[in-house]
Amino acid sequence: MSEPLDVRGLQRRLAEFAAARDWQPYHTPKNLVSALSVEASELVEIFQWLTPEESARVMDDPGTADRVRDEVADVLAYLLQLCEVLGIDPLAELSAKIDRNERRFPRSAE
Amino acid sequence: MSEPLDVRGLQRRLAEFAAARDWQPYHTPKNLVSALSVEASELVEIFQWLTPEESARVMDDPGTADRVRDEVADVLAYLLQLCEVLGIDPLAELSAKIDRNERRFPRSAE
Amino acid sequence: MSEPLDVRGLQRRLAEFAAARDWQPYHTPKNLVSALSVEASELVEIFQWLTPEESARVMDDPGTADRVRDEVADVLAYLLQLCEVLGIDPLAELSAKIDRNERRFPRSAE
Amino acid sequence: MSEPLDVRGLQRRLAEFAAARDWQPYHTPKNLVSALSVEASELVEIFQWLTPEESARVMDDPGTADRVRDEVADVLAYLLQLCEVLGIDPLAELSAKIDRNERRFPRSAE
């Protein structure tokens, strides 16, 4: 799998994966945002009973670390597929949002 | 804002943004996954009463398209901040996940 | 409003409310569960940056207490409407679930 | 199990269940709203790839119907436990909310 590790390359692989399994009819924007929120909740489930301190050490346990990494991948997969079907460039949107927030939220006094 | 549009560059800008506002104490992994799930739900809210067909045309309305882009940016922002505090490389995790899924789910018969 | 404060009475009022506004076509089970999860996330949003201790005092601030009560009502509203369209008795289901859990999870040693 | 099927009785059983297993320290309002949102998402997961029409027939399959009933019970369990720890009467809040909404949203022309 010598595909480059960039967002566009991953989107292409995800699109080919879905097409090869005839999953595109399921991938309406409405369904993809539902799936995205379900995967985000599976991340929350890992943390729901932890104290803040325990949550900061969550990667110390190899089994839990694997679950976290797996759910992060799932969230990103649905986010990139949503952006693909809607024609949104997620990195450009985030960059523009940070620009807006830098104007909106003042820094702490230094 | 000539920062390169890559994930590492965005993570650095998000970290500097949070540090300049003394927000790091709030950014426990537990809180960041909650915030991620809340932003994912704000995306769901845009689509919740739409038919599948209406959801496919959601970018036709400029106001709704702006809301969708804004929420996509928020989801990505919290996902990247979570990965930063946990030491996870999201693109590598997604690539590895696609590799696993290609072995796990057979293609449709051709 | 002398309606009795029971689940059946509230379900009847919610059904009449939706019917009087022609909202039933939107109230598919799929849409109602999305709306339920969105309202649950609006509750999470109130708590997302709080410490455990701050979260325990959330009702001390009258404005925040009103937001919490309002979101609790919204979650219950969609849960009851979902149960209405699916023919589920939520109190009976919860009672049966507690019965099952009492068999499944042993008590702490006394 | 001759407990009456009312909200107060179910809240009492849930409180005794948690106390007997020493689970109260985990039941901060912050954790309970996270758990509530996770259970709501488990309901969404059942419906995420269904068409509106398929979602309306979800109770026709006995296995899926059992999953839906089980998740409904879980959502209600966490909602009632949250209300218990915060001193909120969920039925009274919903009734008051319906009153407000009846003033806020006009009926369709008749």
Image (cartoon, coloured by chain):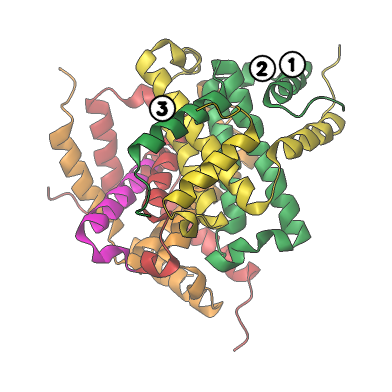
Chain colours: A green, B yellow, C red, D orange
Residue picked out by circle 1:
A19
Going by the numbered disc 1, the residue's amino acid type is Ala
Quarter location, residue B63: top left
Of all residues, the one furthest to the front in this rendering is A110
Q: Position of residue C12 (x, y in %)?
A: 27, 40
**Which chain is home to disc 1?**
A
Residue picked out by circle 2:
A24
Task: Identify the secondary structure beneath mark 2.
Answer: helix
Residue at the image point whose x is 54% and y is 24% from the top: A92
Q: Which mark is residue B46?
A: 3
**Which chain is home to disc 3?**
B
Residues tagged 2 and 3 counted as in contact (Cβ below 8 A)? no
Residue D83 to residue C41: above or below: below
Front tag of 2 and 3:
3
Determine if marks 1 and 2 fall on one subunit. yes
Q: Is residue B47 visible?
A: no
Residue at the image point whose x is 51% and y is 29% from the top: A95
Per the rendered image, the range of residues in magenta is: C57-78
Task: Give the Cα distance between marks 1 and 2.
Answer: 6 Å
Task: Give the Cα distance between marks 2 and 3.
Answer: 21 Å
Within 10 angstroms of label 3, few (less than 14), some, or many (20 or more) residues? some
Between C61 and A105, the one lying in front of the other is A105
Residues tagged 1 and 2 counted as in contact (Cβ below 8 A)? yes
Residue at the image point whose x is 35% and y is 42% from the top: A105
Going by the numbered disc 3, the residue's amino acid type is Ile
Q: In this view, does B87 lie to the left or right of A35?
A: right
